């Protein structure tokens, strides 16, 4: 089959010329299948590209995890295991 050079009709999304806007205020022209682009972070304000640390998220993944499950250390796990053993012995002795 020879390549005709044409796209199939009615199966491709509409392609827009848009102006992307970042939360820091930076804007640039690009093309997208969405009519508007609003970004939280871009290369102008991302710490990897700027080289400076900037507070973006007040509560990150690690903080949310420790808040939900509590901060666990090796000592904390040992004391919890010892307490669990002690309660198991007491219940076994009470039978």
Image: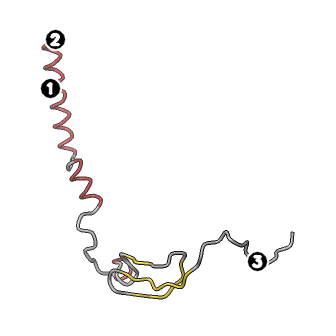
x, y (%) of residue 79? Answer: 16, 37
Residue in front for this viewpoint, 35 or 69: 35
What residue appears at the point 39 percent right and 76 percent down from the top-left corner? 39
Label 3: how many Cα within 10 Å (few below 14, some 14–19, many 20+): few
Q: Which is more foreground, mark 2 or mark 1?
A: 2
In three-dimensional space, the C-alpha distance between marks 1 and 3, rounded to whole angstroms, equals 76 Å
Q: Is residue 84 above or below residue 2?
A: above
Q: Residue furthest front?
A: 10
Q: Which is more foreground, mark 1 or mark 3?
A: 3
Secondary structure beneath dot 3 equals: loop
Secondary structure beneath dot 2 equals: loop
Label 2: how many Cα within 10 Å (few below 14, some 14–19, many 20+): few
The residue indicated by pointer 1 is 86
Residue in front for this viewpoint, 72 or 69: 69
| Rendered-image quadrant of the C terminus | top left
What residue appears at the point 73 percent right and 75 percent down from the top-left corner? 7
What's the coloring here?
Answer: secondary structure
Residue in front for this viewpoint, 66 or 3: 3
Q: Is residue 24 above or below residue 71?
A: below
- Residue 6's mark? 3
Label 1: how many Cα within 10 Å (few below 14, some 14–19, many 20+): few
x, y (%) of residue 63? Answer: 24, 58
Secondary structure beneath dot 1 equals: helix
- Residue 95's mark? 2
> Which sits earlier in the primary sequence, circle 3 or circle 2?
3
- Cβ–Cβ under 8 Å for marks 2 and 1: no
Q: Is residue 66 above or below residue 84?
A: below
> Which sits earlier in the primary sequence, circle 1 or circle 3?
3
In three-dimensional space, the C-alpha distance between marks 3 and 2, rounded to whole angstroms, equals 82 Å
């Amino acid at each position: 089959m020879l390549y005709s050079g044409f796209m199939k009709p009615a199966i491709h999304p509409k392609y827009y010329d848009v102006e992307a806007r970042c939360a820091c205020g930076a804007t640039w022209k690009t093309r997208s299948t969405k009519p508007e682009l609003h970004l939280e972070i871009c290369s102008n304000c991302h710490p990897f590209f700027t080289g400076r640390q900037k507070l973006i998220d007040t509560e990150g993944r690690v903080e949310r995890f420790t808040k939900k499950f509590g901060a666990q250390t090796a000592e904390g796990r040992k004391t919890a295991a010892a307490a669990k053993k002690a309660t198991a012995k007491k219940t076994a002795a009470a039978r």
